[in-house]
Image (cartoon, rainbow, N blue to C red):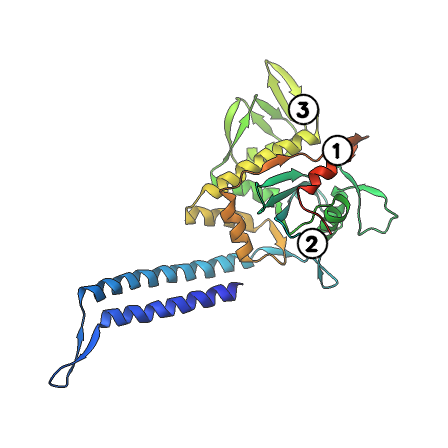
Amino acid sequence: MAPIVLFVLGLAHGALAVATVAAFRGKRIVGADGRVHRRRGPVRIVLGLVGAVLVLTLLAGEAGWFYANRQWDKVERVDVDVDGDNALAGDSGGTNYLLVGTDARPGTEGNRSDTMLVLRTGDGPAKIMSIPRDLLVTIPSRNDGGELHRINAAYNDGPVALIRTVQESVGIPIDRYIEINFTSFGDLIDALGGVTINFPNPAFDTKSGLDVKESGMVRLDGKMALAYVRSRTYTEVIDGTEVTDPTADLGRVQRQQAFLRAVLAEAGASKDPFKLNEIGTSLLGGLRVDNHMELVDALRFAWAMGGLDPQPTTLPTNIVGPALELQQPAAQEVIADFGAAG
């Protein structure tokens, strides 16, 4: 796609440059004495000036495209091909993005998926749904007779195993895979100048470092935003009484959805190219995408973010000891809104 875009830009640039030069040179006229003259009327001068502006605009566009491509080439790719076939199934409707947040930091070992969300766009109102880490599913990549595992374990086997598990065991087709390390996510929030979250009550979590002393709309910096999304013992101060969220991971899922919607709105609202460059640069170190995702796909997603207000969707589950299982048939009805796998 990129070579085609550059080819079209080059053709347009060349044609405009020729037309601009011709307008400035003027009309060729041969006088009675046989000498060649050039007539430059006001119309030609105006056309020449307009052409010059367009040429410079296209030149800036080409430079921006080259720069964006160079930056995009720095993003780490995840090979999602298995035996030559793309593991991403997708469907004929909208686009499903599997958004994975990892929490690789000092003190943690191996691969750890902290957050899994599916964002659907393109066929009606955008929808977003979290997949609980503790959801019990079979992992297709493991030949263990269909034994149940927490879905978080699928990521330990690699992104392809996670993609296949979401598609085959949960039933949601995936078009695009995007993974970001939470450390880079904090840098993104700082690049945005913070993100605003509505706190019904003052809240804290001594384990994650969250400490919000006032209720209402609170602007969080990168450090505090990370503390918010990492919070597992989220405690509110209600009428002077400390109340820890009894829903544990389910409550955390709802907070993460609200948080992501706020981040999408903040990032998409900015049209300042310098700020957008800072936002993009902040993500480079911790971003991974599927190897079929091109710059045009990324730009399309980024451009749409400003208008996205995804509807939060809850995946119906039942508590099974320390884990969760899909609550049927309610879960299947919700999953159907995200397309049909297979």
Q: Contact (CB < 8 A) between labels 3 and 1?
A: no
Residue visible at 61% across and 44% down in the picture: 120
Q: Position of residue 219 (x, y in %)?
A: 49, 31
The residue located at (59%, 13%) in the rendering is: 239
Dot placed on the residue nearer the N-terminal end, 3 or 1: 3
The amino acid type of the residue labelled 2 equals Ala
Q: Residues within 10 Å of mark 1 (few under 14, many from 20)?
A: some
Three-letter code for the amino acid on which mark 1 is drawn: Thr
Q: What residue occupies the far left of the structure in this picture?
A: 33
Q: Which mark's residue is nearer the viewer, 2 or 3?
A: 2
CA gap between label 2 and label 1 equals 25 Å
Q: Position of residue 50 (x, y in %)?
A: 28, 61
Q: Which element type, helix, strand or loop, lies under badge 2?
A: loop
Image quadrant holding the N terminus, namely bottom right
Say which residue label 2 marks.
89
Q: Are marks 2 and 1 in contact (CB under 8 Å)?
A: no
Return the residue at label 3. 245
Separation (CA) of disc 2 from disc 3: 37 Å
Q: Residues within 10 Å of mark 2 (few under 14, many from 20)?
A: some
